Image (spheres, rainbow, N blue to C red):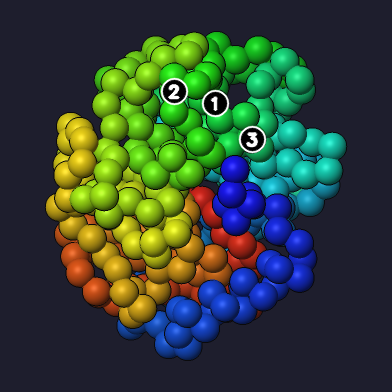
Amino acid sequence: MEKSLRFFWTWVGLLVLALAGLVGCGSGSSSSALGSALAVSNQSASSITFYAAGANGNVGPSATLSGSSTQLNGPTGISFDSSGRLYVANFGGGTSIGSIAVYSPASYNNAAPLSLISGTNTGLDQPMGLAVANGTIYVANSGNNSIATFPVSGNGNIAPSTLIAGSSTGLNFPTGIAVDASGNIYVGNTNGGAVDIFSARSSGNVAPASAISGSNTGLNGPAGLVLVGGKIYVANQLGFTLTVYPVGINGNLAPSQSIYGTGSGLNQPVGVAAGAGSIYVANLASITSYPANGNGPIAPSAVLTGASTGLAHPVFLAILP
């Protein structure tokens, strides 16, 4: 597995990359602003930062979740349920192989989680993307190339309800995950160079039901993804692009939209979220937004970056309910 796609850089390497990201994004930001309120996971700071709709430029977060009581440990994937509870995947570090923390609505500062799924029985191993749907937590484990599910009420050292794993799955550093209304599971299979779609309730050593894969797709290190408006938006971490496909596509087909270029502000993008007619992307040292119908070498509508933002290796993001 390529070390460049592992998310536990040394502090020196992380500093160099962060500086490069700031240069890549440019010094100026758009006159527009974020159309939706966002929560962002900051892996290197072990924090979740929150930004009000209208934020833009080098502005501070409206609130922060961090501190020893939170049990945040390299947070990655984040999601809200319909009641406003926040679910966070922790990549882990040191002796920890990862966990899932759940917080009550409007948990800020050094708030403790309501529950914590953690331990050897869970099958969690360097979890990245996380989604919540139909009373179920879905998580992509980059460390052991698996997709695990748990009930939203889960707590402690519990076994997953289902586990997609094995050579037939084709999973190779799965990063992003999304679930459609029918329960089908979409996975940004980063080192596999594909978006793999597994049927609802899949478990075991099963092959994807379909896949977006091949040289025509424009996929290059596909990571985070989001489903909205009949489209799949995919952040390509290695390609520095955002590619878009109609839901239901299968095989080696070209994207219907693609955002790219040095002026786009895309720099090792991972997380993607959608809201208020915009697409939001977590880059190495910034959050950028684009119109949902954006296409070509376009500039972002808004850029959130700078020392005041509290961003520290932002990985995933979610729209506040």
- 167 in relation to 271, above or below: above
Residue 226 visible in the displayed image: yes
Which amino acid lies under the numbered mark 2 shown in the image of this protein? Thr
Mark identifier at residue 189: none
Closer to the camera in the image, 242 or 301: 242
Does label 2 or label 1 sit earlier along the sequence? 1
Q: Distance between the residues labelled 2 and 1?
A: 8 Å
Q: Is residue 180 left or right of residue 37?
A: left
Q: In this view, does 244 lie to the left or right of 201?
A: left
Does label 2 or label 3 sit earlier along the sequence? 3
Q: Mark 2 points at which residue?
A: 169
Alpha-carbon neighbours of circle 3 within 10 Å: few (<14), some, or many (≥20)?
many
> What residue appears at the point 39 percent right and 61 percent down from the top-left corner?
239
Which amino acid lies under the numbered mark 1 shown in the image of this protein? Ser
Number of marks in the image? 3
Q: Mark 3 points at which residue?
A: 143
Residue 228 visible in the displayed image: no
Which amino acid lies under the numbered mark 3 shown in the image of this protein? Gly
Q: Do the residues labelled 2 and 1 touch (CB within 8 Å)?
A: yes
Alpha-carbon neighbours of circle 2 within 10 Å: few (<14), some, or many (≥20)?
some
Task: Give how far across and how far down residue 226 sits, in percent.
Answer: 34, 43
Task: Give how far across and how far down residue 55 sits, in percent.
Answer: 44, 70
Q: How far apart are marks 2 and 3 (CA)?
A: 15 Å
Q: Do the residues labelled 2 and 3 touch (CB within 8 Å)?
A: no
Q: Is residue 225 left or right of residue 41?
A: left
> What residue appears at the point 44 percent right and 19 percent down from the top-left corner?
168
Q: Quadrant of residue 111?
A: top right
Q: Quadrant of residue 321?
A: top left
Task: Give how far across and how far down residue 76 sits, in percent.
Answer: 59, 46
Q: Name the residue under label 1.
A: 146
